[in-house]
Image (cartoon, rainbow, N blue to C red):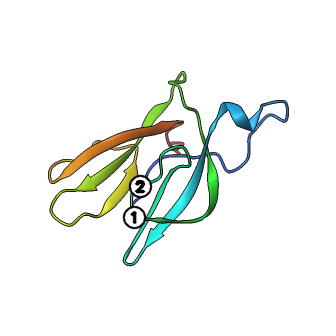
Amino acid sequence: RDVTGVQTCALPISDLDPADFEQLHLYARPGDLVVAGVSQPPPGFSDAGFEGYANPNPIPGGVAFTLYRNDATGDYVSTTAVLPAPYTAQWTIGYVLPPEQR
């Protein structure tokens, strides 16, 4: 599935407290995988392990990392992009830095 944006797999500064961040996990159900925050996993999915961290609050230069649901298929997608219908935003997972432009 599509996951767009940057999530931090390790905190970049050793004195940061992981409790200050939203832990991201991969969630699975038959035919569907999605990254979401542990504080609000998608319904009907099993936890498939750690993926990284997102900031729970807006950050300078950051973008919202949002969980969407396709209203036609029930498929979930987490992305920093704004998706058109039939996708509906479910909630903001956290905030991440956008991909580096090279």
Please give the name of the residue rendered at 58% of the width and 46% of the height, measured from the top-left corner.
Answer: 7
Q: Position of residue 67 (x, y in %)?
A: 37, 48
Which of the labelled discs sits on residue 19, or is there none?
Answer: none
Taking the image as shown, residue 76 lies to the left or right of residue 22, namely left
Q: Which secondary structure lies at badge 1?
A: loop
Name which residue lies at 53% across and 25% down: 57
Could you say where residue 70 lies in the image, as x and y percent from the top left?
Answer: 23, 58
Query: Residue placed farthest to the front in the image?
Result: 44
Q: Is residue 1 visible?
A: yes
Is 53 located above or below residue 86 in the figure?
A: above
Give the x, y percent position of residue 92: 41, 37
| SS label for mark 2 | loop
Residue type (three-letter) at the residue carrying disc 2: Pro
Image coordinates for residue 53, horizontal then vertical, percent? 62, 44
Label 1 vs label 2: CA separation?
A: 6 Å
Q: What number is the disc on residue 44?
A: 1
Residue 13 figure quarter = top right
- The extreme bottom residue here reads 30
Q: Is residue 16 above or below residue 66?
A: above
- Mark 1: few/some/many CA within 10 Å (<14, 14-19, 20+): few
Q: Residue at x 28, y 42 (%)?
A: 82
Is 3 rendered above or below residue 10? below
Whether residue 83 can be seen here: no
Tell which residue pokes out farthest to the right in this image: 14
